[in-house]
Amino acid sequence: QVQLVESGGDSVQSGGSLRLSCAGSGFTYGSYCMGWFRQAPGKEREGVASIDSAGRITYADSVKGRFTISQGNAKNTLYLQMNSLKSEDTAMYYCAAVPLWVASETLSALYCLRPGNYGEDDWGKGTLVSVSS
């Protein structure tokens, strides 16, 4: 089973930047979704950015042009570069990965961005991002 560990969360001022990292161990998925998600107090978990095994990248509208998702060469490391941070970006950020039983490119590009498509055991414990205005 894959274990995911996030790091890089911090407190920054509005307009600042952070880079989150997610280190995965035991990652042997051929077809998969990986993504960054966030949950603010009192709100539902939402997708921020995702990438699938075909290399398709999807962003939430709220972060397009500000956030960039990328993978390490070994594919089991995920990064999220966050620029021009806003107070509304304050949340716990989670990394998640799930295997797929079909080729990822046969699915909608939004499939990997939906938290409900990841199981209970597919998540890291999160890293906190706090943006002050």
Image (spheres, rainbow, N blue to C red):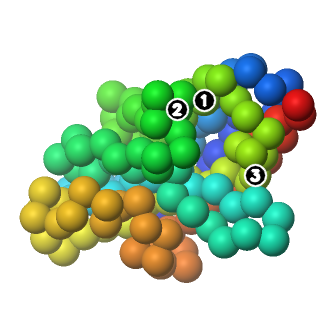
| Whole-percent x, y for residue 85 in the image | 70, 30
Looking at the image, residue 19 sits to the left or right of residue 23; the answer is right
Front-lying residue, 3 or 16: 16
Local packing at callout 1 (Cα closer than 10 Å; few below 14, some 14-19, many 20+) is: many
Up the image or down, 103 lies above or below 121; here it is above
Up the image or down, 128 lies above or below 77; here it is below
| Whole-percent x, y for residue 34 in the image | 40, 54
* Residue kind at label 2, given as amino acid type: Phe
Front-lying residue, 13 or 94: 13
Looking at the image, residue 110 sits to the left or right of residue 105; the answer is right
Give the CA distance from mark 1 to mark 2.
4 Å
Looking at the image, residue 33 sits to the left or right of residue 82; the answer is left
Which residue is disc 2 drawn over?
Answer: 67
Give the CA distance from mark 1 to mark 3.
13 Å
| Circles 1 and 2 in contact, beta carbons < 8 Å | yes
What residue is drawn where x is 31% and y is 43%? 57
Q: Secondary structure at mark 1?
A: strand
Which residue is disc 3 drawn over?
Answer: 91
Dot 1 or dot 2: first in sequence order is 2
Front-lying residue, 44 or 54: 44
Asked which quadrant contains residue 55, the reply is top left
What residue is drawn where x is 54% and y is 45%? 62
Front-lying residue, 117 or 99: 117
Asked which quadrant contains residue 18, the reply is top right
| Whole-percent x, y for residue 99 in the image | 31, 67
* Residue kind at label 1, given as amino acid type: Met
What residue is drawn where x is 67% and y is 51%? 93
